[in-house]
Image (cartoon, grey):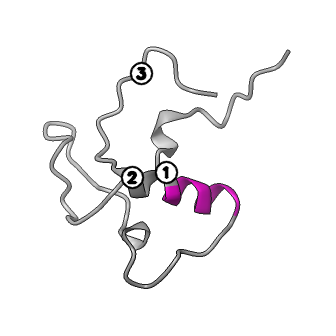
Amino acid sequence: MPKRGHVDHTYADHASILKFIEWNWFLRPLSKRSRDNLPNPLALPIAPYFPLNSPAVGDLRTMFDFRNPRTH
């Protein structure tokens, strides 16, 4: 379920979608050189847009709350 009212500051690009798909379905990265092999960014709260471990790209998991699934 998406986090409501949450602004995520994690650096992401098109490879983030691929990283999320690989994580969610337990898939391996496309190749050793592809951007989906980059680590998730680590940043300080005072500078969320500047990863300490650059180059890095997020995998979109910080945009969702997997602990509380929606019940209908």
Give the residue displayed 21% in from the left and 41% down from the top: 48
How would you rate the neighbour count of disc 1 (Cα within 10 Å): few for under 14, some for 14-19, many for 20 or more? some
Q: CA distance from mark 3 to mark 1?
A: 19 Å
- Residue 57: x, y in percent? 33, 57
Give the residue displayed 28% in from the left and 55% down from the top: 42
Q: Is residue 37 left or right of residue 13?
A: right
Circle number at residue 14: 2
The vertical placement of 32 against 20, above or below, is below
The magenta segment is 18-25
Q: Is residue 54 left or right of residue 40?
A: left
Helix, strand or loop at mark 1: helix
Mark 2 vs 3: CB contact within 8 A: no
Instruction: Mark 3 or mark 1: name the one nearer the start of the chain.
Output: 3
How would you rate the neighbour count of disc 2 (Cα within 10 Å): few for under 14, some for 14-19, many for 20 or more? few
Amino acid carrying mark 1 in the image? Ile
Q: CA distance from mark 2 to mark 3?
A: 20 Å
Q: Which residue is mark 1?
A: 17
Figure quadrant of the C terminus = top right
Amino acid carrying mark 3 in the image? His
Give the residue displayed 33% in from the left and 48% down from the top: 12
Please tell me which residue lies in front, 26 or 33: 33
Q: Which residue is mark 3?
A: 6
Nearer to us: label 3 or label 1: 1
Query: Dividing the picture into quarters, in which one does residue 49 lie?
Result: top left
Figure quadrant of the N terminus = top right
